Structures are given as structure tokens and as C-alpha cells.
């Protein structure tokens, strides 16, 4: 972690700006029903870059594992041929294992998805900020585990679909 208070505030400011821009982008795209493949790829890339920055800043020994896992899922979602009118997120919300369907249901506006996405950022941010309160780790670790487990299951499901000759569609 970084003990410099200025670096902590810059980190928190950048992270907050990234998260708010991501929320605004998603809201506007849904509100005006205007999505493009480019926009979805840009959103996915920005998400992955933000995740990578947060994990690197955390200096946690398992950060590289999570970065690789998340980029693998992102790349698979982006490069699998576009053969359908549905997004990969929609496919995960309608097919496969029940917990995965729930996680992706309602455009990920559900308790499980919200908790794990928040925990996914708070856990490494807490490491970076060198916070010593054990309670924040106890609260965020299960959400981080859910997030990364969903990421791994996504990878396995996409690989399985590729092997069967089917594809997930548009990124986003």
C-alpha cells in the first residue's frame, strides 16, 4: 500500500470518476436505447483497465491471477464471433447454472451482482489505502470470491460454447 496521503486521494478520485462515468455511460445507453458494438467494446476495455489499475495498486500477491482471469473473460467476450442478436450478458442471464443466471439477471441490477461488484473494487482499494480495519475485509472478501468465481464460470461457459460451435454475441 501507499502511505502518501496525496496518492491515496488521487487514487480515490480516479477510481470514483471511473465508476461514475461507467454508471453514467450504462444509464444513458439504456435510457436512450442507443448501444453500439464500439461502445460496448469501449466500455468493456475501460472496465478491464480500471480493474487492472486497482489490482496493481493493491500490490496484493494474487492480483496478477485476478487480472489474468478478468482479461481472459473480457477478451473471450469481445472476440467470439458475432452470430446472434443478443449480448453475452443476456445469454448468461437466460442459460446455464442458476446462480449465474441470477447474477446477470435484470442487467446485473440485483443484490448478488451489486454486492460482488462493489466488493471487487473495495477489497483491492482497501489494500492500497492500507486500511487496517478487519471488518472491511470480512465484508468484501465473500463478494470478491463471488465476482471472481462468476468470471471463471463465464470463461468455462464461453469455452464450452466455442467447442460446441456456438457463440456468444455482442460484447457488453
Image (cartoon, rainbow, N blue to C red):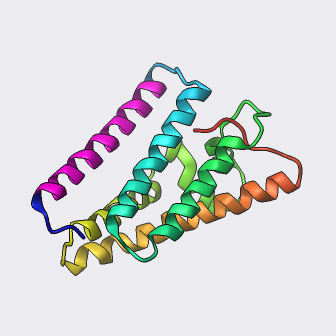
Q: Is residue 68 above or below residue 161?
A: below
Task: Please state, as top left, top right, bottom left or bottom right, where the C terminus lies in the image.
Answer: top right
For residue 70, which quarter of the picture?
bottom right
Residue at 40 percent across and 49 percent down: it is 50
Residue at 41 percent across and 31 percent down: it is 25
Determine if residue 119 is in view. Answer: no
Determine if residue 6 is in view. Answer: yes
Horizontally, residue 18 falls left or right of residue 11, namely right
Query: Viewer-proximal residue, 43 or 114?
Result: 43
Query: Viewer-proximal residue, 106 or 11?
Result: 11
Q: Is residue 134 above or below residue 161?
A: below
Q: Residue furthest left?
A: 5
Confirm whether the magenta stretch covers residue 99.
no
Residue at 38 percent across and 74 percent down: it is 60
For residue 73, which quarter of the picture?
bottom right
For residue 150, which quarter of the picture?
bottom right
Horizontally, residue 118 falls left or right of residue 81, namely left
How far across and down, in percent of the image, does residue 37 sit? 61, 28
Task: Please state, as top left, top right, bottom left or bottom right, where the N terminus lies in the image.
Answer: bottom left
Q: Is residue 84 above or below residue 74?
A: above
Query: Viewer-proximal residue, 70 or 157?
Result: 70
User: Over which residues does the magenta segment extend?
Assistant: 6-30
Q: Is residue 37 above or below residue 97?
A: above
How far across and down, in percent of the image, does residue 144 sit? 43, 68
Confirm whether the magenta stretch covers residue 13.
yes
How far across and down, in percent of the image, does residue 38 sit? 58, 27
Residue at 27 percent across and 40 percent down: it is 17
Amino acid at each position: 500500500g501507499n502511505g502518501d496521503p496525496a496518492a491515496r486521494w488521487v487514487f480515490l478520485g480516479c477510481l470514483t470518476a471511473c465508476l461514475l462515468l461507467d454508471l453514467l455511460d450504462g444509464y444513458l445507453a439504456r435510457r436512450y436505447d442507443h448501444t453500439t458494438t464500439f461502445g460496448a467494446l469501449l466500455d468493456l476495455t475501460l472496465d478491464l483497465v480500471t480493474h487492472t489499475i486497482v489490482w496493481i495498486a493493491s500490490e496484493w500477491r494474487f492480483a496478477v491471477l485476478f487480472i489474468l482471469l478478468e482479461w481472459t473473460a473480457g477478451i473471450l467476450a469481445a472476440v467470439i464471433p458475432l452470430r446472434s442478436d443478443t449480448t453475452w450478458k443476456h445469454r448468461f442471464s437466460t442459460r446455464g447454472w442458476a446462480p449465474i443466471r441470477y447474477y446477470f439477471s435484470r442487467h446485473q441490477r440485483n443484490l448478488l451482482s451489486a454486492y460482488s461488484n462493489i466488493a471487487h473494487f473495495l477489497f483491492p482499494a482497501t489494500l492500497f489505502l492500507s486500511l487496517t480495519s478487519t471488518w472491511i475485509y470480512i465484508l468484501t472478501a465473500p463478494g470478491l470470491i463471488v465476482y471472481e468465481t462468476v468470471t471463471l464460470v463465464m470463461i468455462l461457459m464461453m469455452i464450452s460454447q466455442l467447442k460446441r460451435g456456438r457463440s456468444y454475441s455482442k460484447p457488453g
